[in-house]
Each structure stands twice: as structure tokens, then as C-alpha cells.
Amino acid sequence: MTDLLRILIVEDSTEDCLFDRPRTVRRRFDVTSQRVTSAAAMEAALEAHKWDLIISDYSIPGFGGHAALAIYQHSNLREELIHQLQ
């Protein structure tokens, strides 16, 4: 039996948000994810679901790492937030 792993991806590029999950992750977790590209979409996603992990691109036109971090901190979440620096 696999556990559900919910990942919120803050990323403007479809190609960059497609990550190859290692076989051990695929066997252990049923991964579901949602990609958001704006502050409003991130806030709505945070209100709509409980996420296990939030992965954020640092540089998104009109919205990026600093804004995503501010929304995350304002939401008082306990989930992990990972910034991708490129």
C-alpha cells in the first residue's frame, strides 16, 4: 500500500516542474501535484488542500521566491518549502 504525497509546485515553466521521481519514491508514495504560477493561485491552492511539500522556483515573472516565501510564512504552515535556485 502506498501513501499519498501532495506536492504544490510554484513554477512558471511546465518543463521545469516535471521531475523524475526515483523508483523508491514511486513505490512508497502515490504522488499528486499541482502547479501554480501566481500569488493568487498559490493562496487558493493553500486554502483548498493540505500539502506535504511545497517546491518553489525562485524566479517567476511577476511572482517569485520572495513573494512565495511571504505567502508561505503568512499562512503559518508546517509543510516544508524548498526554493529552487537556478
Image: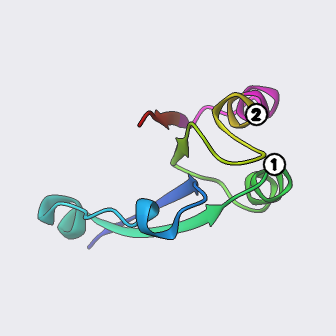
Residue 61: x and y in percent read 71, 48
Q: Is residue 8 above or below residue 82?
A: below
Disc 2 residue type?
Ala
Q: Looking at the figure, which quarter contains the C terminus?
A: top left
Mark 2, secondary structure of its residue: helix
Image coloring type? rainbow
Question: Neighbour class for label 2 at 10 Å: few (<14), some, many (≥20)?
Answer: some
Kindly identify which residue carries mark 2.
67
Separation of residues labelled 1 and 2 (CA atoms): 7 Å
Kindly identify which residue carries mark 1.
39
**Residue occupying the point 61% across, 31% down:** 78
**Residue range highlighted in magenta:** 70-80
Q: Is residue 76 above or below residue 5?
A: above
Residue 26: x and y in percent read 23, 68
Please tell me how many numbered marks the rendered image carries: 2
Whether residue 1 sits left or right of residue 51 in the image: it is: left
Between 18 and 52, the residue placed more toward the observer is 18
Disc 1 residue type?
Ala
Is residue 35 highlighted in magenta? Answer: no
Whether residue 78 sits left or right of residue 47 in the image: it is: left
Between 40 and 85, the residue placed more toward the observer is 85
User: Are circles 1 and 2 on residues that touch, CB within 8 Å?
Assistant: yes
